[in-house]
Image: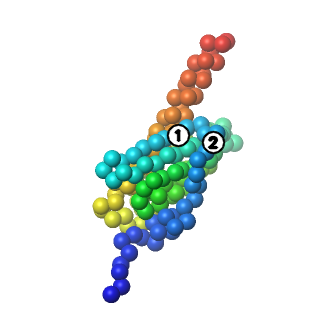
Amino acid sequence: MKQKNIYSKQIMNYFSHPKNVGVMKKYDGVGKVGNPVCGDVLWLYIKVGKNKKGEEIIADAKFQTLGCVVAIANSSLLTELIIGKPIKEVEKITQEDLIKKLGKVPPIKIHCSFLALDALKEAINDYQNKKTKNNRRAVRRS
């Protein structure tokens, strides 16, 4: 009897060949999230730059995920979607956007697909908080 794979081809491809894996040493923002139910943990690092229009963009992104197939696949997909994109555009990415690109996610694994987007929000918040603190310091020195 042939066993049916519960994951889509897209999920298996991102899981088997993840992109942008690793720790970024000089990052502008980091998000660390976890799911206490399943034990998955994810770190997402972002480097921010500017495009030709002067917009802040995600110049680079790396992730480390200690988790299941869906959590790893979703993290890899998210990094591909955000690199080179303006932060304002990246902030509009929804869970539905990711699930559409991943293909069929088993209902029991939907919660695993939330981690990457939650980590992205934290990384952007971390970057913006650091930027605000640096701006305050610059104003005090003036």
Q: Which mark is residue 76?
A: none
Outermost residue, bottom side: 1
Three-letter code for the amino acid on which mark 1 is drawn: Val
Q: Position of residue 117 (x, y in %)?
A: 44, 48
SS label for mark 2: loop
Q: CA distance from mark 2 to mark 1?
A: 11 Å
In this view, the mark in front (2 or 1): 2
Count of numbered labels shown in the rendering: 2
Give whichever of 57, 53 is nearer the camera: 57
Which residue bears the numbered disc 1? 30
Looking at numbered disc 2 in the image, what kind of residue is underneath it? Answer: Lys
Q: Which quadrant, please, contains the N terminus?
A: bottom left
Task: From the viewer's side, name the closer residue of 71 and 57.
Answer: 71
Q: Can see residue 34?
A: yes
For label 2, the residue is: 25
Dot 1 alpha-carbon crowd within 10 angstroms: few under 14, some 14 to 19, many 20 or more:
many
In this view, 82 is above or below 106: above
Residue drawn at x 55%, y 25% is 132
Q: Position of residue 115 (x, y in %)?
A: 41, 49
Q: Quadrant of residue 17?
A: bottom right
Residue at horizontal 43 percent and vertical 49 percent from the top: 41
Q: What residue appears at the point 57 percent right and 55 percent down from the top-left corner?
A: 21
Marks 2/1 in contact by CB < 8 Å: the verdict is no
Is tag 2's residue or tag 1's residue first in the polypeptide sequence? 2
- Can residue 57 be seen here? The reply is no
Q: Position of residue 139 (x, y in %)?
A: 62, 15
| Secondary structure at numbered mark 1 | strand
